[in-house]
Amino acid sequence: MKKPAMLLALTTVAAFGSAQAVTVTLACGSVGQELQLCKDGAARWAKKTGNTVKVFESPNLTNDRLGLYQQQLAAKSSDIDVYQLDVVWPGLLSQHFVDLKGKIPAAEVNANFKGIIAADTVNGKLVAMPWFTDAGLLYYRTDLMKKYGYSAAPKTWAELAAMASKIQAGEQKTNKAFAGYVFQGKNYEGLTCDALEWVASFGGGAIVDDAGKITINNPRAAAALNAAASWVGTVSPKGVTTYDEEPARGIFQSGNAAFMRNWPYAWALGQGEDSKVKGNIGVAPLPAGPGGSPAATLGGWQLGVSMYSKNQAASIELVRYLTGPAEQKIRAIEGAYNPTISALYQDKDILKANPFFGSLLSVFTNAVARPSGPTKGKYNQVSQAFSTAVSDVLNKKMTGTAAVAQLSTDLARIKGRGW
Ligand code: GLC
C-alpha cells in the first residue's frame, strides 16, 4: 500500500434531536476525483437524514484495497459499514456482505444494467448495488491528429503504433518527454484489464471461458502480448511498465502523449480548467488486432453493506441513496463516472457533459468481463498469474508464446480439481 489509510471525519450534522441518528463509515476509492465526489455524495445524504458519515480513504490501487478490506472482513471488524467493491470482487467476498435483495426495492435494482446486477449476484444473493461502470477507452489528441494529417482514430493496433510513432518523432524534436502511447503496464489488476483487451481484440479469448476452461494458451493471445511488448521502449516510454491509471493520465493531461488507454474518469479531468489538453481530446473504441474486433474490459464499482456493520439499516439507506439516479447523475456530470442505470444514458445533461456516453454506448454495454464469474474465489490468483505473465512479456523476459504456455500450466495448478 502506498500510504497509510486514514479515517477522515467528514461532516458532522446535527441529529435533529433524533435518538436514531447514527454514524456510518463509508470506504471510498481515491483515484482522480473519486474521493471528493464520494465525500460530497455522503454529505448530501448526511444532510438529508441527520446521520453522520465518516469517509475512509482507500488506497489507489484496487489490489491494495482488496488486501486491506480482506483483513478487515476476516477480522469481522465493524469499523467500516459500507464498502466500495470492484466488479470482480463479489465472488471473492460475498460471504461478508448483507443480501440487498428485498432490502432495496426490486424496481430500483432492475433499473440497472442486467449484466452488472448479474455480476453482483452470487448464488442468488445481491452482494452489492452497482454505483458506476467502467470500460477501457482510447483517448487521443485531436489537435495532433490534424497536425500530422490523420482524419480518424486508429482502428487497429498496428495503425495505432504507426501513428504514435510518427507523432512521437515529430513532437520529440521540441519535447523530449513526449510519448506516442501510454497505458497501464505495471504488474497489477489494471494490467490484467489492459492485457485482456489486447488478447480479446486479437481473437484470443478471455483467459478462462464461461464454462471454466483455461483458453489462454493460443497463438492469437501470444501475438497480442508480443505486439504490446513491441510498444515498450518504442512508441511507449520504457517506464510504462510502472504506470497505473494516474501516471498515464498525468502524462496525457500535461500534453505529453498522443494516445492513452484509460477509463472514462480521465475525460472529466482532461477537460478540466487546469488541463493542458482541454478541448483537444477525442475518445474512441480501443483498436482491434488482425482479424479481430475491438474489446474493452468491463470495470466498475459497487457499494455493499458489511455483515459486521452495527448500523445495517442506515448503511443500506446510504447505499440506496448513493447508487440512486440523482447521485449517479451528479457523478456522471462532475466526474464522468458512467451510470449503471440504463435510463440515464438518455439524460441530456449527462450526454452534454460526456458526448461519448452516447456515441460509444455499445462499448459500455458490450464490455468484456474478466473471468471472475467462472473462477469464483480463485479470481484474484488467476488475475495475478495473468498480469505477472504479461509483465514478463512486456519486460522482454519471455516471449508471448512461452508466457501463455507457462501461464496455462500455472492456471491449471490454481484450478486444481475445479474453481
Ligand atoms: C478501474 C475499474 C476496476 C479495475 C481497476 C483496475 O477502477 O473500474 O474494475 O479493477 O480499474 O485498476
Image (tube, rainbow, N blue to C red):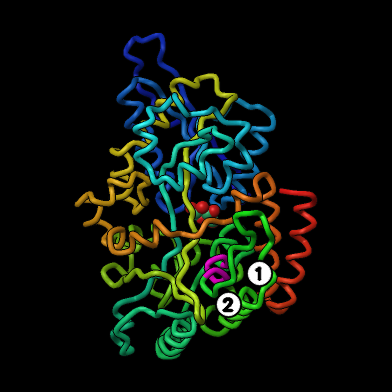
Q: Which mark is residue 156?
A: none
Distance of label 2 from label 1 (alpha carbons): 9 Å
Q: How crowded is mark 1: few (under 14 residues within 10 Å), some or many (20 or more)?
A: many
Dot 2: element: helix
The residue at which mark 1 appears reads as: 390
Which amino acid type is marked by label 2? Ala
Identify which residue, 269 or 9, lies in the foreground: 269
Which amino acid type is marked by label 1? Val
Q: How crowded is mark 2: few (under 14 residues within 10 Å), some or many (20 or more)?
A: many
What type of secondary structure mainly makes up the magenta span? Answer: helix
Identify which residue, 237 or 300, lies in the foreground: 300
List x then y, in percent, for residue 127.
53, 35
Q: Do the residues labelled 2 and 1 touch (CB within 8 Å)?
A: yes
The residue positioned 59% from the left and 49% from the top of the image is 373
Dot 1: element: helix
The residue positioned 43% from the left and 28% from the top of the image is 53
Position of residue 127 in the picture relative to residue 222 (left or right): left
Q: Which quadrant holds residue 210?
A: bottom right
Position of residue 290 in the picture relative to residue 335 (left or right): right
Position of residue 415 in the picture relative to residue 12 (left or right): right
Magenta span = 195-200
Can residue 56 be spotted in the picture?
no
Q: Residue 228 carries which label?
A: 2
Earlier in the chain: of badge 2 and badge 1, it is 2
Can residue 215 be spotted in the picture?
yes
Q: Is residue 321 above or below residue 63?
A: above
Q: In this view, does 186 lie above or below 180?
A: above
